Image (tube, rainbow, N blue to C red):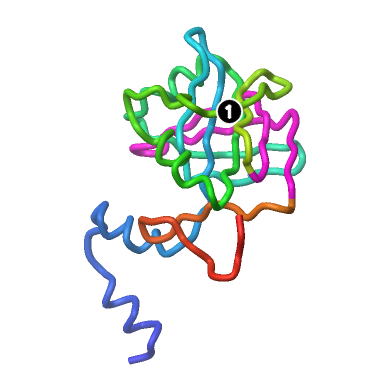
Amino acid sequence: METSERARSEFRGPISPQRLREVVGSFCSGVVVVSAVGADGPIGLTCQSFASLSLEPPLVTFAVARTSRTWPRIRDVGSFCVNILAADQRELSQQFSRSGADKFAGVEWSPSPLGAPVLDGVVAWIDCELRHEYDGGDHTIVIGEVHDLAGTGERRPLLFHRGDYLDIPGTTA
């Protein structure tokens, strides 16, 4: 039996959420905080399913759990900022992933051109208007049209791999 045929036969069967998470977790991703300013002040959430989607027109995408209580509040604003976290911002990632807490407690930020929070020290930020949402099973797929952005090549991104943050030896934040 050829190696590829054997590999296919070994992985047949139902795809459980745990198995999908384990296998797809082999793919390294960056970590972002999606932020906006709502009626009650700044709001944000941590997300690792972010990607560039299109250069013309400039579009980005991310997916957020349908159970999120923060995303509907950001959706209502209609615009948001994607903050690409730096390698030394693990605590910030964890802070914005918690439910029910003041996620902006102790967080320094300044407003983007569209008014959303740009978190201090991020690798880059991308200011967007909400363009589309699509059903993605237990997630909502969000498409944002980019209106402004900035970044620095001096900082390393925060990476996530196999359910944990990834340290790359010899790199600095």
Identify whether 142 is placed above or below 173.
above
Name the spot of residue 134 as percent of width and height, x first. Answer: 48, 32
Identify whether 14 is placed above or below 32.
below
Residue segment shown in magenta: 123-152
Please name whichever residue, 84 or 80, is drawn nearer the observer in this view of the structure: 84
Name the spot of residue 91 as percent of width and height, x first. Answer: 44, 42
Residue occupying image coordinates x 28% and y 77%:
9
Residue occupying image coordinates x 32% and y 57%:
20
| Left or right: where 10 falls relative to 130 | left
Main SS category, magenta section: strand
Please name whichever residue, 167 or 14, is drawn nearer the observer in this view of the structure: 167
Residue occupying image coordinates x 43% and y 27%:
103
Residue 127 counted in the magenta span: yes
Residue 110 counted in the magenta span: no
Judging by the rendered image, the residue that carries numbered circle 1 is 108
Name the spot of residue 82 as percent of width and height, x first. Answer: 60, 35
Query: Image quadrant of residue 2?
Result: bottom left
Query: Image quadrant of residue 3?
Result: bottom left
| Left or right: where 95 falls relative to 59 | left
